[in-house]
Amino acid sequence: MNAETRFDAGELPRLPADYRAPLWWGIVGLILVESVVFATLITSYFYLGIDQPEWPPAGTKTPDLVKPTLGTLVLMASSLPMHWADRGITRGDQTALRWGLLLSIALAVTFLVLKYIEYSEMGYRWYTHSYGSISWAIIGFHSTHVVALILKTVVVSALAWIGYFSERRSLAVKVNGIYWHFVVAVWIPLYATLYWMPRVLK
Amino acid sequence: MTASTETDRPGVGEQASVRPAMSRKAEELDRTWYSPSGFFGWFTQVNHRMIGKRFIITSFIFFLMAGIESLLLRTQLAVPENSFLTPDHFNQLFTMHGSTMMFFFAVPMMEGLGIYVVPLMIGTRDMAFPRLNAFGYYVYLIAGVTLYAAGFLGHAPDGGWFAYVPLTLTQYSPGLGLDFWATMITFIEISALVAAVELIVTIFKQRAPGMSLNRMPLFVWAMLVTMFMIVFAMPPLMVGSVMLALDRTVSTHFFMTSGGGEPLLWQHLFWFFGHPEVYIILVPALGVISSIVVTFARRPIFGYTAMVLSVVAIGFVAFGLWVHHMFTTGLPTLGVSFFTAASVMIAVPSGVQIFCWIATLWGAKLRFATPLLFVLGFFFIFVLGGLTGVMVASVPFDTQVHDTYFLVAHFHYVLIGGAVFPVFGAIYYWFPKVFGCMLNETAGKWSFVLMFVGFNMSFFPMHQLGLQGMPRRVYTYLSESGWFELSLLATIGAYVFALGVLVTAVDALLSFLRKPDAPDNPWGGDTLEWATSSPPPNYNFEDIPVVRGRWALWERGEEPAGTVVGLRSGRREVLVTTLLDAEPHAVAILPGPTIWPFLSAVAVAAGFLGFIRHPIWFPIGLLLTFVGFVGWLWPRAVGGSAEEEQAR
């Protein structure tokens, strides 16, 4: 009876890099919260657009498809080196980690540059009409996420270059990766909404 | 599992013989889990009991402020054509009263109870992210203080607590009042979401070994459901309040019809939050009531499974009710009928709760201490509020009483009955655990009687006033209207209610002068928080208990069923267990006290508040917050290896 009721925690892992770490669950929680925010934005887009005679309103062009699609592919591609870096460090491969993180950052920056070019050429602003307001809100909110993603990955890769991570200590890389994949994945419904819905709703 | 196994409790004699060694361990734990004191130390504390206590005390102060505001409102309405308040002040006061009660009292109070009680109840030493906890508190404090400071400086919001557009757009509400309101509402949502994620992870991953989901105390279940509701309800309001702030500051057209905006979008976003909000406040109260009922009936709850399922059902159905706040906006009949059905349906799980409590209390040898009195008061008031709730769920009736005092009566019966009475019960119930001394029973009974009588005297006449056609939010009325006698009665009732609150507040203040004398388990409760001293030590439990049944302390007399060994005392280690069965599978090392959460909260606040003046503050706030987070999350042992960190 005594042996049953005592539990020895002495040998349990202290630095697990998977679902055994509370931080892993914390990131899942953050992703859940953010998913609801993005879902609300998409719902608002439809709510504002559905009853309008024209969407986008007369005088505003339906958004072009080439640049945004290219940008979407670039952003999706950035998940690959992130995955490579993550897999690398679980095997102790520092090279994969260091270069994978930098490559992901480079692709995310490219995405932002493409977005910047695209939106500086837009003929409308957030104060033009409700279509402008919701489009800029969605783009602004997502781009802010990409900026935050880049900033925090810069910190993770700085730690990677000074050799902080190893196969025994990789939780930060793991959760940074999960969040990265989320920001990439959530862009796909946003892309579909912003660039394809005006064609469908027409 | 039954009382007969009490004889083979893990050696009482053995425990006594190792006591000197244990106290060395306790000393080391005490050093490890120490919370810095003093003025500067205050900004670095992270322990959940410190943060929980702050949430509870701060939100109680906001409760008193909002109470004073309501007394001013009632004084103005006591007699017809009164000029005690100007119309503008009246508008500002009812806006601040509603906003404070909903955002700065009810939700933070429930979070505070969760943050304080849940880790003790599930047998862990702290929450999963202690620094995030502190961050959430500072965000809340800054939001509340800023809103009130702005109000006193003449920038009080006056658009009501649900701030309907277009009234709240710059065209009709110039000035900074509503800018502060929209910004601070966004801001306080952050605090609620932070607490939600934190409590969910803590409940999922840090329960004591053996506390599988089907053995979890009902209070913890209620908190878990509430926090999931926050995760789904608060983000839409955040989006809505950001849109409102953008419409006001950078002229977007989300709600302004002139540019294709939709005013009703605000109502949808607000009530998609606003209705679950009622249940976000109510569900933790249900948990409090279950705790108190079990303890004072001195028997296990009747229908544990039904209780859990009905709380979860309330959590789901609460999201299908929001449109019943919008019945008069001309929505399609089919949609409106759906929401009527859902609004009536929620009475079913609520009824299951009530009947299970009655079944638990039935024939039990009750001890009529103050916490139980507040629970019985809850039954009476909440059931009345529920009945009028079923009435206003029907469209024709709702159309008749919409925006009248009938509504005011209904939601005060639901909110004061559903939240304030249980919170007072919780205060009397857990006060000895939190502060180490009992509150005065005589004062408690007086407080209850005054609050109960005052409440009904104040709000019951409002049903009648509403049926007579008195609209809500009017700053005065004519003497010919025939509303005078009942309004005066309501005003007198409000003062009686306030007196009852005052009795508890004074009693609580006086108790700080007394020496801590409360026993560990004054009420004979079954949950783990009663297994440690009152108030608990910095580290909560010297040994993490092992749980072997649903009624942790009752399974084996006063002692939990076993202990965990092997957690290091020299650093902040907590046990991580599996989600369903709570089997240990890792150890987490928690961070210690730090100033960074406070600095990060200030950085976020700078971004939000600066944005009212100029959009440039958005990137500035983002960068400052980034710096704050890097300082906060910077690893402990950049130089050392992982092997050292595992073994140290």
Image: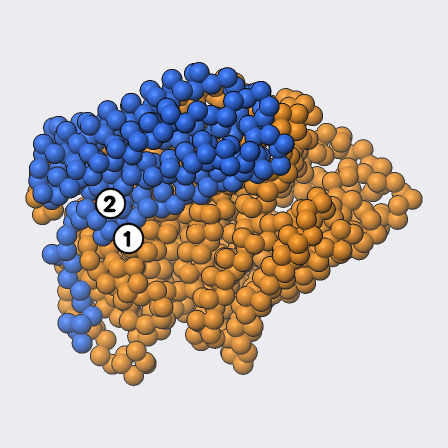
Q: Residue at x 15, y 62 (%)?
A: A8
Chain (blue): A
Label 2 sits on residue: B590
Report if residue B41 is visible in the image: no
| Discs 1 and 2 lie in a common subunit | yes
Q: Nearer the viewer, residue B162 or B495?
A: B162
The residue positioned farthest toward the bottom in the image shown: B4
Q: Which one is earlier in the sequence, the residue at label 1 or at label 2?
A: 1
Q: Is residue B8 left or right of residue A194?
A: left
Q: Numbered disc 1: what chain?
A: B
Q: Residue at x 23, y 68 (%)?
A: B562
Q: Give coordinates of residue A50: x percent, y percent.
A: 58, 37
Quadrant of the image for the N terminus of chain A?
A: bottom left
Label 1 sits on residue: B125
Chain B painted colour? orange
Which secondary structure lies at badge 2? loop
Q: Residues within 10 Å of mark 1 (few under 14, many from 20)?
A: many
The residue positioned farthest toward the right in the image shown: B480
Look at label 1 and name its amino acid.
Answer: Arg
Q: Residue at x 27, y 62 (%)?
A: B582
Q: CA distance from mark 1 to mark 2?
A: 10 Å
Q: Residues within 10 Å of mark 2 (few under 14, many from 20)?
A: some
